[in-house]
Image: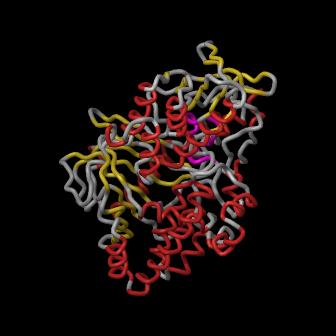
Amino acid sequence: MGGLACALDLAAQGAPVVTLEAAAAPGGKMHETRIGDAAIDSGPTVLTMRWVFDALFADAGATLDAHVRLTPLAILARHAWRAGEQLDLHADVRRSEDAIGAFAGAAAARGFRGFCAEARRVHDVLEGAFLTAPKPNPVTLAGRIGLHRMHDLFAIRPFETLWGALGRHFEDVRLRQLFGRYATYCGASPLQAPATLMLIADVEQRGVWAVDGGMQRLAEAMAARVVALGGDIRCGAEVAEIEIAGGAATAVRLRSGERIAARAVVCNADPNALACGGFGRAASRAIRATPMQARSLSAFTLAMTARRADFPLTRHTVFFSRDYPREFADIAAGRAPSEPTVYVCAQDRGDDAAAPPSERLFFIVNAPPSGDRGALTDAEASECESAIKTKLEACGVHLDWGGAEMRRTTPAMFHRRFAHTGGALYGRAPHGWAGTFLRPGTRTAIANLYLAGGATHPGAGVPMAALSGRLAAAAALRDLASTRRSSAAATPGGMSTRRAMTDASA
């Protein structure tokens, strides 16, 4: 998303742009798993902040609706803890409030109102000062918000954990789990992430959309628009090295040996791949490596087609563990949770839509980013699958597991696809008040070399990664305009199937 958004902005401004993708199709972490004739979303599954893509396509002389069909969801997600115990969040906040009141009582409904108001305020304060602006530090962020608005600066609650802040709104631990889960969207633990991340709840409340045909259609639409504007997108083009001369990025060299000169290079890989030498030794000084202990969450996933489940799945359904602190303690200790929270994307369902006889399902369980410290054994992987089955069955979901064909992804497999990450899917975890400021920004220590993607500012998630690409394009265009009138730019990004320190992850 970062590389595609950057390429689209550059091409729309008339810059000659070449986008290099190691994989067979554009999209990066947004990709599909094929089981027979079924294509299953096996990366991001939730689309929010539609306005980001409306603006991106508008600035490229098109409309999003002309390229992708989006359907707003009335039910944002269904949540369950055990059989007969479930709660829906709705796009209509009043329906959510009523549902929470029926689920946990009048005090919980009042707590939800207060939480929504606080999350909305955090989002409103940070949208222009942080989300759509270049990476700040604490001083510049305060300046953007305005020293005359110190009440707003403290309202974002950077020094309080999300878990602690939720305790002020909800006595019911199940509701703390539900809203604490938003921290995992950034690869963080709700027990360590700042309360600032409650803004994600407000983002979802403003709209969640399903992409007709799967999330990959959005990546394809962006790529098609880049090409229509004269840009070049080359898949199966693995970057081996970003060449540095005179303290600036000057070219990229492909694994095939081809060399492409460029006045600007935007790296859409995980920044750790750059720092660890994945694009050559000279380019590694562009940014500092992420310490192992600062990595974000990884995941254990299953993609499958199955007979219709007897549980009333909606598009997005979450089955919570009984002990959230224990779940994240297991992950922090480097082991898969003994009782995981399981997210299920039922891709053939919408708002309470009946499923077809055979439906596409994608399961995600949070896991430690330890993919470079040994792969899961077959026995350990089987234990993860068993834990998923046990959790689902405890909530009343009974599937024909024996008759289903499945595709599994482990942290080690993510590490092989996204080299130098250990399988961490979101870059650096935004833990503590300073965690967000430690995430890399657009510019690097090397001139003409820029960063984009979900592991860079402003953060993880499909729209946030797109915003990072727009920030990279704007920075590159400003710098290019100050040096010459027309300059080429290259945007390497995507996945690597190689593991050696000298291999690229883009």
Extent of the magenta region: 415-427
Q: How is the image coloured?
A: secondary structure
Q: Is 139 left, or right, of 413 in this rendering? A: right
Which of the pair 477/191 is nearer the observer? Answer: 477
- Would you say the magenta stretch is mainly helix, strand or loop? loop
Q: Position of residue 315 (x, y in %)?
A: 31, 55
Q: Quadrant of residue 251?
A: top right
**Residue lying at 32% horizontally and 81% vertically, measured from the top left:** 102
In front of the other: 41 or 457: 457
Q: Position of residue 150 (x, y in %)?
A: 69, 73
Which of the two residues, 252 or 431, is positioned nearer the viewer here?
252
Residue 168 % position (x, y): 56, 81
Q: Position of residue 460 (x, y in %)?
A: 55, 50
**Most extreme residue toward the bottom, as rendered?**
106
Q: Residue at x 33, y 76 (%)?
A: 99
- The quadrant holding residue 146 is bottom right
Tell me, yes or no, whether the highlighted magenta stretch contains residue 129.
no
- Seen at 50% across and 63% down, the residue is 181
Q: Quadrant of residue 205?
A: bottom left
Q: Is residue 420 magenta?
A: yes
**Total marks placed:** 0
Kindly give the residue lying farthest to the top in the view shown: 257
Work out which quarter of the rendered image holds the C terminus and state it: top right
Residue 319 shown left or right of residue 396 in the figure: right
